[in-house]
Amino acid sequence: MRFIFLRCIKFYQTQISPLLPKRCRFYPTCSQYAFKAIEKHGVIKGTIMGISRILRCQPFNKGGLDFVPDKFSLFRNKKSDKIGDEIINKNKKSSE
């Protein structure tokens, strides 16, 4: 079952996504997030996490880094925010 879901995501990434404009507000993209979530948490929880992420990917959300958390969650990974802040601070220091 997991194999089928992952192959569907890969099909979307290689055949459909290149035809569409870039619009994901997050890194990694929503399809990459769903793929990793299914790999890490299984088909049911991973699919739910992927759908939750897609629902967050809209113009009223600032986006940014959001990696798959180690524990099942429907909300943004707070560790990703810390990593993003560290990267921004490093870039600011190096440009000064």
Image: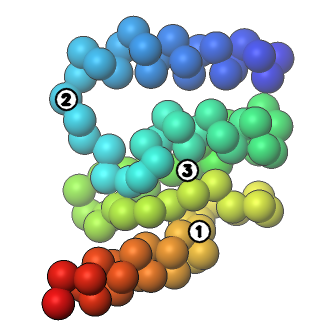
Of the residues shown, which amino acid type is indicated by label 3? Ser
- Where 21 sits versus 42, above or below? above
Quarter occupied by residue 35: top right
Q: Nearer the viewer, residue 92 or 21?
A: 92
Label 2, secondary structure: give it. loop
Q: Which residue is mark 3?
A: 52
Residue 2 is situated, as x and y percent measured from the top left of the image, at 79, 22
Which residue is rendered at x = 42% and y = 52% of the image? 27
Label 3, secondary structure: give it. helix
Q: Earlier in the sequence, mark 3 or mark 2?
A: 2
Residue 21: assigned label: 2
33 vs 40, left or right, is left
Of the residues shown, which amino acid type is indicated by label 2? Pro
82 vs 25, left or right, is right
83 vs 48, left or right, is left
Residue 25 is situated, as x and y percent measured from the top left of the image, at 31, 52
- Where 91 sits versus 16, above or below? below
Which residue is rendered at x = 26% and y = 83% of the image? 94
- Crowding at dot 2, Cα within 10 Å, few <14 / some 14-19 / many 20+, comes out as few
The residues bearing labels 3 and 2 have C-alpha atoms spaced at a distance of 21 Å
Label 1, secondary structure: give it. loop
- Crowding at dot 3, Cα within 10 Å, few <14 / some 14-19 / many 20+, comes out as some
The label nearer to you, 3 versus 2, is: 2
Residue 71 is situated, as x and y percent measured from the top left of the image, at 79, 62
The label nearer to you, 1 versus 3, is: 1
Which residue is rendered at x = 82% and y = 17% of the image? 1
Q: Which residue is mark 1?
A: 77
